Every structure is written in structure tokens, then in C-alpha cells.
Amino acid sequence: MSTSATKQLDTFSNPAPQRDYEIRFECPEFTCLCPKTGQPDFATIRIRYVPDQLCVELKSLKLYLWSFRNDGAFHEAVTNRILDDLVRATQPRKMTVVGDFYVRGGITTVVEASYP
């Protein structure tokens, strides 16, 4: 597997598809670029989901999140994009992505997007 940033998310078969259980990820080193200023925006991305048949593979998730470092995106757009891409890859029973963006100009932003 490559170690370059990529938008591809790899999956593996859920080892317990008969059971509802929650998987949680916390990614405190997320960065993207402000589409207005080009300056970096820093965030903690939190992902919670109940898998169905597939789970997301962690290294691919890390490389996927790294791929946003050079992308200009509003906080709302990037949080919803992460949710959409993860739902498309894993087809979970339910999923929530929270983008908890650090202070910029005296304001913090928290964006929460859920599926279904």
C-alpha cells in the first residue's frame, strides 16, 4: 500500500455483521486550507459509525484525511465530503462525522453531519 495522500478509501469485511456495534475514530491532526485566505485550518475530525458489511481500513483513512492538506474548503463542505465519501465506501448502518475546527479569528466551528 502506498504512503501518499489519496482520496481512495479501502475497506475490509466486518468480522461481526450480525451485531450492531460502534467504531470511533479521532483524528486530531486534520488540516485543510481556508478557501478565502489559503491559510491552514486545523481540526479534530471525529468519526462514529455502526458498520454493516464493510469497515474502513485505518491506513487508507489516514491517507485519505491527509489528502485534504492542500485542498481549499469551507468547514461545512469538508465535513460533509468526508461523511459522503465514507458512506459511499462502507454503506454503514449509521455514521456521524464531526469537524471540530480550532480557533480562527476568535471563533471555533463545530460541524456535525450524520447518515442516514
Image (cartoon, grey):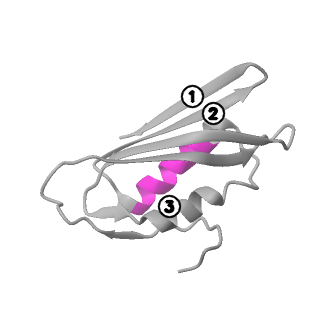
Q: Are marks 1 and 2 in contact (CB under 8 Å)?
A: yes
Label 2 residue SS? strand
Residue drawn at point x = 65 percent, y = 24 percent: 108
Label 1 residue SS? strand
Give the CA distance from mark 1 to mark 2: 6 Å
- Above or below, 16 relative to 78: below
Any mark on residue 25, and which? none
Is 12 on the left-hand or right-hand side of 17?
Answer: right
| Residue 84 x, y percent position in the rendering | 49, 50
Is 91 on the left-hand or right-hand side of 100?
Answer: left
Give the CA distance from mark 2 to mark 3: 19 Å
Residue 35, image quadrant:
top right
The front one of 29 and 88 is 29
Residue drawn at point x = 71 percent, y = 47 percent: 32
Magenta-colored span: 78-89
- Above or below, 37 relative to 7: above
Amino acid at pointer 3:
Leu
On the image, numbered disc 3 is attached to which residue? 61
In terms of secondary structure, what is the magenta stretch mainly? Answer: helix
Amino acid at pointer 1:
Val
